Amino acid sequence: MAIDRQATGWIVIRVALGTFFFFEGLGKIRWFLDASILAARLHQWLEASPQASLSRWYLERVAIPWTGVFARLVPLGELTSGLALVAGLWTPVFAFVAFFMALNFQFASGTLVTYGFLTNAYGLPVLGSTLGLSIGGSRLPLSLRR
């Protein structure tokens, strides 16, 4: 029996990212009861962002007004995406959810179009891997759903 190296590589990426997102979600469990934790981080990013930047606009118009909703959706999304990726359940769908959440954090923090994005472990490696799984992660072996 030959080993499909490409599929094995995708599985390693899928399980590693799933584990990463699950534990990121566990670290944010307190957000369910205390949205001020997220609000403090968003305000820090707002203070650090330039006046006319897109991230400042996003923070002022979307993220900060909806902090209470995001404080519940982010940990829930990270936990469910993490578990789904580890199990191989609807990998492209949950990888895209994880990609979208990570993209929002990069955009809100203002690091998306900076050199720091390229050297930040939460930046390019996570966004590239989740986008790759969104595109090519279907029908992998060792998945609950093929």
Image: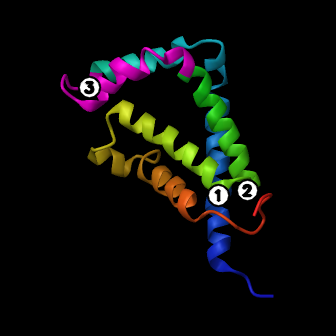
Circle 1 residues within 10 Å: few <14, some 14–19, many ≥20: many
Screen quadrant of the N terminus: bottom right
What residue sits 67% from the left and 64% below the top? 11
Overall secondary structure of the magenta section: helix
Q: CA distance from mark 2 to mark 3?
A: 38 Å
What is the x, y in percent for residue 116? 32, 44
Q: Are marks 1 and 2 in contact (CB under 8 Å)?
A: yes
Callout 2: SS: loop
- Queried whether the magenta region covers residue 53, the answer comes back as yes
- Give the residue pinned by disc 1: 14
**Sequence-wise, which precedes: disc 2 or disc 3?**
3
**Sequence-wise, which precedes: disc 1 or disc 2?**
1
What is the x, y in percent for residue 57? 29, 24
Above or below 69: residue 9: below
Q: How is the image coloured?
A: rainbow
What range is drawn magenta here? 48-69
